[in-house]
Image (cartoon, grey):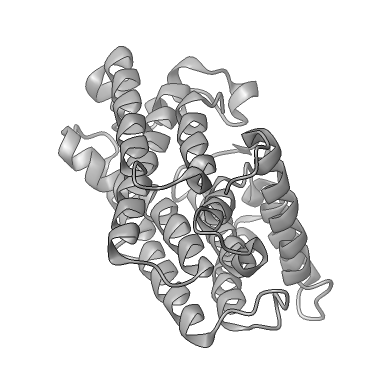
Amino acid sequence: MASPVPLSKFIEQCRLQVDNALSTVLPDDSQVSPLLLEAMGYSVFNGGKRVRPTLVYAACQAFGGDLKQANPAACAVELIHAYSLVHDDLPAMDDDDLRRGKPTCHKAYDEATAILAGDTLQSLAFEVLGNARLCPESTLADSVRLQLVTILSQASGLAGMAGGQAMDQCAAGTVLNQQQLELMHTHKTGALIRASVRMGAICAGLLQAEELQSLDHYARAIGLAFQVRDDILDVIADTQTLGKLQGADMALGKPTYVSLMGLEAAQAYARDLHNNAISALSGFDHGADFLRQIADYIILRSY
């Protein structure tokens, strides 16, 4: 049964839990390159919302799991997310100067260090899943850890986030239809969100195929809704609130839901996706209430 605490408190609890775990996972020092280690910490602990780890924990809780068992999955998805943002901000990609209101990694350090920081965060994500000593409070079986590695690697690579990012790079200055736009974003943004939900559920124990399918429908809907809301905020929010340059996607000529559908239609589509996500959880009890509330949060957030 879900605790009656508000979502804001649950998100804060998740943030504290994953940040504590991440602080133990990242080495305290490095004889090889203290600068690289510093850049890694700068990229991980820079004020992120921790949406993906929160989804991991919420999915684990939905099935009555012990949240400590989900620490490796929560750390791993956040490390992959952090690496992707470091590389996404590079001059060869989106060439962004700000991330969460702070200089991007390549601005705070340099391009080479940023590339290596992203590479190392990615490798650390899979080490967390495979090395039981990094999150000793979690006692997941090796077979479960292997499932988590497989899910996260698929969500991060050609069939997931990296493939979607490549499609995004090629799409700049072109016009995509809605089907193409959704193909891109179910990979670029949605794949890691879907992986977060699935990994969290698996950390709770054995699940039925129907349960996993319903969770995947939920996660696919909120993954798209997350991107639609991002596109809306790129138009209606200001730079200070966003923590990055307002209108950056428009300036780069990127196809967005707003440019394709118009602002009002994009807002209506976000609401439709939210409703689809809630419907997908209709067979779950109150243990999934935080998953339901996260769907609300995703389409109402201001940054």
Residue 91 lies left or right of residue 182; in this view the side is right
Q: Position of residue 140 (x, y in %)?
A: 58, 79
In which quadrant is the C terminus drawn? top right
Viewer-nearest residue: 208 or 260: 208
Q: Residue at x 62, y 41 (%)?
A: 49
Residue that sits furthest to the bottom in the current view? 142
Q: Residue at x 72, y 78 (%)?
A: 136
Q: Residue at x 40, y 75 (%)?
A: 150
Residue that sits furthest to the top in the current view? 264
Q: Is residue 105 above or below residue 208?
A: above
Residue 68 lies left or right of residue 293; in this view the side is right
Q: Is residue 205 above or below residue 253?
A: below
Q: Residue at x 77, y 59 (%)?
A: 20
Q: Based on the displayed image, in which of its 4 quarters is residue 224 positioned?
A: top left
Q: Is residue 80 above or below residue 6?
A: below
Q: Position of residue 92 (x, y in %)?
A: 45, 51
Q: Position of residue 246 (x, y in %)?
A: 52, 23
Viewer-nearest residue: 161 or 65: 65
Q: Based on the displayed image, in which of its 4 quarters is residue 252 positioned?
A: top left
Q: Based on the displayed image, in which of its 4 quarters is residue 180 positioned?
A: top left
Viewer-nearest residue: 175 or 15: 15
Residue 254 lies left or right of residue 90; in this view the side is left
| Total count of labels | 0
Q: Is residue 297 above or below residue 239?
A: below
- Observer able to see residue 125: yes
- Observer able to see residue 253: no
